[in-house]
Image (spheres, helix red, strand yellow):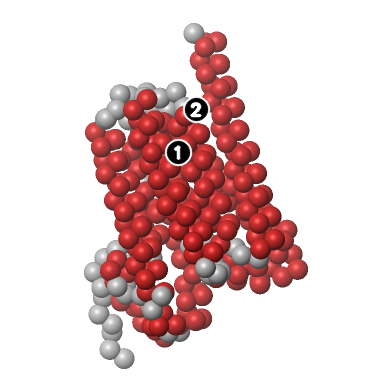
């Protein structure tokens, strides 16, 4: 029995190592594409597809309940295709990501090397996310467990919410007002970054898929939403994007900050009289 358990553990380790190497290679490719095209948007498209492929591979190679693996595979595939195609279409139309543009300008002559290291850090973040998918798919408890029902509902709400938010901001950007104003329509009335909120919400589903296993390793799946929240709210999402918006929209965006939550959707606040 010990030898069987040891063999299973080694197989799991090899699967995860192979996925980690694949993600690193994918982000190396993203670096090469950015250097060749000078369009940073392709980076996030490739990252989205790489996480999706890694997630699909994880569901195929895991040894959990078959029904849960199938549901997990469908969810991560739909998430990856929608987000990757959305970012790809935006980049194809010539839109440069202001977050990457600011970093590359700041890095100066060292931009190529520092971008490569930065993208390998993104590969590491991607691995944490794919590992959560793997832990969910490795859960042997028969599907559907009550936590699975909650997870599926959460994932559907997140997928639809992010798609709606992206469509709403896309329509706004095609209007004349987008040159000077900020978007306050639809979901954007209640959060300055509803697309980021729903992206994070989607990753909250994976611990719910995994935790019914009751194993100590399944608790590591909580790292996925924790990491996504930290990145979006404190590191590479909101801070650089809002810095760009303050530079380009000034007082208009500052007024938006005073009345609309940054991340979690909520009631609008009345602006204090000056």
User: Which residue in the structure is indicated by mark 1?
Assistant: 132
- Contact flag, marks 1 and 2 (Cβ < 8 Å): no
* Pointer 1 local density, CA inside 10 Å: few below 14, some 14–19, many at least 20: many
| Furthest-top residue in this view | 1
Q: Secondary structure at mark 2?
A: helix
* Quarter of the rendering occupied by the C terminus: bottom left
In the rendered view, does 123 fall on the left or right side of 68? right
Closer to the camera, 265 or 184? Answer: 184
Q: Out of 260 and 99, give the one closest to the viewer.
A: 99
In percent of width and height, residue 108 lies at 72, 70
- Residue at (38%, 65%) from the top-left corner? 193
Residue 197 image-quadrant placement: bottom left
54 versus 81 height, above or below: above
- Residue 199: x %, y % from top left: 40, 54
Q: Position of residue 212 (x, y in %)?
A: 32, 30
Residue matched to label 2: 61
What's the CA distance linking mark 1 and mark 2?
14 Å
Numbered tag placed on residue 164 in the rendering: none
Q: Residues within 10 Å of mark 2 (few under 14, many from 20)?
A: some
User: What element does badge 1 sit on?
Assistant: helix
Q: How many marks?
A: 2
Q: Is residue 177 left or right of residue 41?
A: left
Instruction: Name the residue located 49 percent from the left edge and 64 percent from the top edge.
Output: 90
Using the rendered view, name the quadrant where residue 67 is placed. top left
Furthest residue in direction bottom, as rendered: 274
In the rendered view, tell whether residue 115 sits above or below residue 140: below
Q: Position of residue 246 (x, y in %)?
A: 47, 79
Q: Is 204 or 98 nearer to us in this picture?
A: 98
Viewer-nearest of discs 1 and 2? 2
Give the residue drawn at x 44%, y 82%: 179
């Amino acid at each position: 029995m010990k030898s069987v358990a040891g063999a299973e553990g080694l197989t799991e380790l090899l699967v995860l190592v192979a996925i980690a190497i694949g993600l690193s290679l994918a982000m190396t490719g993203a670096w090469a594409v950015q250097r060749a095209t000078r369009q940073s948007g392709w980076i996030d498209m490739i990252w989205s597809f790489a996480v999706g492929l890694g997630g699909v591979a994880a569901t195929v190679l895991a040894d959990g309940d078959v029904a849960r693996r199938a549901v997990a595979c469908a969810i991560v595939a739909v998430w990856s295709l929608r987000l990757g195609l959305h970012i790809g279409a935006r980049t194809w139309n010539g839109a440069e990501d202001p977050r990457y543009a600011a970093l590359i300008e700041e890095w100066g002559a060292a931009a190529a090397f520092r971008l490569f290291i930065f993208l390998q850090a993104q590969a590491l973040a991607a691995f944490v996310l794919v590992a959560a998918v793997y832990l969910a798919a490795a859960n042997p408890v028969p599907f559907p467990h009550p936590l699975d029902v909650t997870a599926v509902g959460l994932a559907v709400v997140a997928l639809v919410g992010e798609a709606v938010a992206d469509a709403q901001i896309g329509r706004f950007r095609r209007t004349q007002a987008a040159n000077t104003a900020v978007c306050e329509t639809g979901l954007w009335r209640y959060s300055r970054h509803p697309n980021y909120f729903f992206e994070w919400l989607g990753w909250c589903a994976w611990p719910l898929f995994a935790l019914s296993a009751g194993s100590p390793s399944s608790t590591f799946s909580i790292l996925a939403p924790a990491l996504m929240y930290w990145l979006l709210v404190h590191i590479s999402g909101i801070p650089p994007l809002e810095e760009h918006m303050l530079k380009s929209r000034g007082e208009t965006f500052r007024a938006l900050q005073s009345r609309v939550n940054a991340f979690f959707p909520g009631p609008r606040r009345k602006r204090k009289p000056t």
